[in-house]
């Protein structure tokens, strides 16, 4: 049995569960379940706190897991990132009191409040800076106002929460994080299957199938617009002067490609979603 760690709550939980379901795995039906067996796929799911997943996988107690890149790096676990999963994106930045001239080098000997001391400490050390890290479980933006810290390091989206606390972003980006598949280094064949399935889900979400008919005289122009992953499929039609073409097209380009195909003479342009894929 392949042992897989899955976030039991938080921003990663729902999307991770949905992705695994799209990959053909049986998840939990009750949010209180901590362990779920999927005998058909020969896997066992363990639902854990996202912050603990890297520790369990790194110890070898579990084979693979889904967590945030930020949590993996902050844990200092020996687990390794296998693949990015394209959800749960976040950006880590430093913030200082508005109107002050604190810069990155000013953090030498300063107090920095964060929920990710391992991640932030490693970043500062990489820049030759030693600071006193104040670990807080949340609401780090209040640390400066309450006199606990001189600056903070936290997840930033629009920066509005920081501005409301009288803070402003400064310095370089600490980390661009996303959900990732991590591994203990297992050679379990089920781990390779899991990776292929998750990659198939990503492809299915990013691409659509496009079918159209085009005159042979304009085939090269049309195929240049729809090169597909490897090469488009070309099929003859009853009318020998026309052919049918099928190719995978990036989902976000769908309507633009349809417009351009129509302009070069393609007709009967149809788009179909992809539910699963292996590339």
Image (cartoon, rainbow, N blue to C red):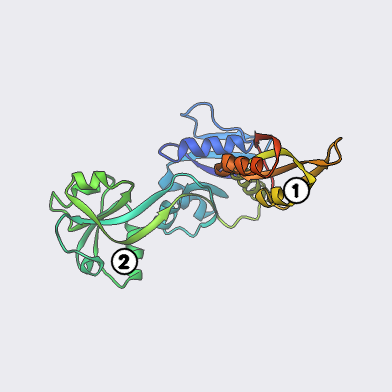
Q: Secondary structure at mark 2?
A: helix
Q: Residue furthest bottom?
A: 128
Up-down relation of residue 95 to residue 17 (above or below) = below
The image quadrant of residue 138 is top left
Question: Does residue 268 appear to the left or right of 60 in the view shown?
Answer: right
Q: Residue furthest top?
A: 30
Instruction: Tell me where residue 62 appears, x and y as whole percent.
Output: 55, 48
The image quadrant of residue 109 is bottom left
Up-down relation of residue 247 to residue 24 (above or below) = below
Q: Which residue: 52% across, 44% down?
A: 5
Taking depth in this image into account, of 256 and 165 the one nearest to the observer is: 256
Question: Does residue 114 appear to the left or right of 179 in the view shown?
Answer: left
Label 1 Cα crowd, 10 Å radius (few <14 / some 14-19 / many 20+): many
Q: Which mark is residue 74?
A: none
Taking depth in this image into account, of 235 and 196 the one nearest to the observer is: 235
Which callout, 1 or 2, points to the residue nearer the camera?
1
Q: Which residue: 83% across, 41% down?
A: 241
Q: Secondary structure at mark 1?
A: helix
Up-down relation of residue 33 to residue 66 (above or below) = above
Label 2 Cα crowd, 10 Å radius (few <14 / some 14-19 / many 20+): some
Query: Is residue 62 at least partly visible in the picture?
Result: no
Instruction: Tell me where residue 18 appears, x and y as whole percent.
Output: 54, 35
Taking depth in this image into account, of 233 and 45 the one nearest to the observer is: 233
Up-down relation of residue 238 to residue 62 (above or below) = above
Disc nearer the start of the sequence (1/2): 2
- The quarter of the picture where the N terminus appears is top right
Instruction: Tell me where residue 247 appears, x and y as whole percent.
Output: 70, 44
Which residue is disc 1 drawn over? 219
Q: Which residue: 35% across, 64% down?
A: 123
Which residue is disc 2 drawn over? 124
Query: Is residue 276 at least partly visible in the picture?
Result: yes
């Amino acid at each position: 049995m392949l042992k897989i760690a899955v976030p039991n709550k938080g921003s990663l939980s729902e999307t991770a569960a949905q992705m695994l379901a799209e990959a053909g795995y049986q998840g939990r039906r009750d949010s209180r379940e901590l362990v779920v067996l999927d005998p058909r796929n020969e896997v066992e799911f363990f639902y854990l706190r996202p912050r603990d997943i890297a520790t369990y996988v790194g110890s070898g107690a579990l084979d693979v897991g889904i967590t945030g890149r930020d949590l993996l790096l902050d844990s200092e676990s020996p687990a390794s990132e296998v693949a990015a999963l394209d959800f749960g994106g976040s950006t880590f930045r430093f913030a200082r009191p508005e109107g002050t001239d604190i810069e990155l080098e000013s953090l030498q000997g300063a107090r920095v409040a964060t929920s990710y001391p391992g991640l932030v400490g490693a970043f500062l050390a990489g820049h030759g800076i030693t600071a006193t890290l104040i670990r807080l479980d949340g609401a780090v933006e209040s640390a400066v106002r309450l006199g606990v810290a001189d600056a903070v390091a936290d997840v930033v989206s629009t920066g509005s929460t920081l501005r409301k606390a009288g803070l402003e972003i400064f310095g370089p980006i600490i980390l661009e994080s996303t959900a990732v598949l991590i591994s203990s280094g297992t050679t379990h064949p089920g781990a390779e299957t899991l990776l292929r399935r998750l990659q198939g889900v990503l492809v299915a979400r990013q691409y659509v199938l496009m079918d159209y008919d085009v005159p042979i005289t304009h085939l090269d122009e049309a195929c240049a617009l729809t090169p597909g992953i490897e090469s488009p499929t070309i099929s003859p039609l009853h009318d020998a002067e026309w052919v049918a073409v099928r190719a995978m097209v990036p989902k976000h380009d769908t309507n633009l490609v349809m417009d351009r195909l129509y302009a070069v003479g393609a007709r009967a342009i149809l788009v179909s979603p992809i539910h699963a894929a292996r590339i």
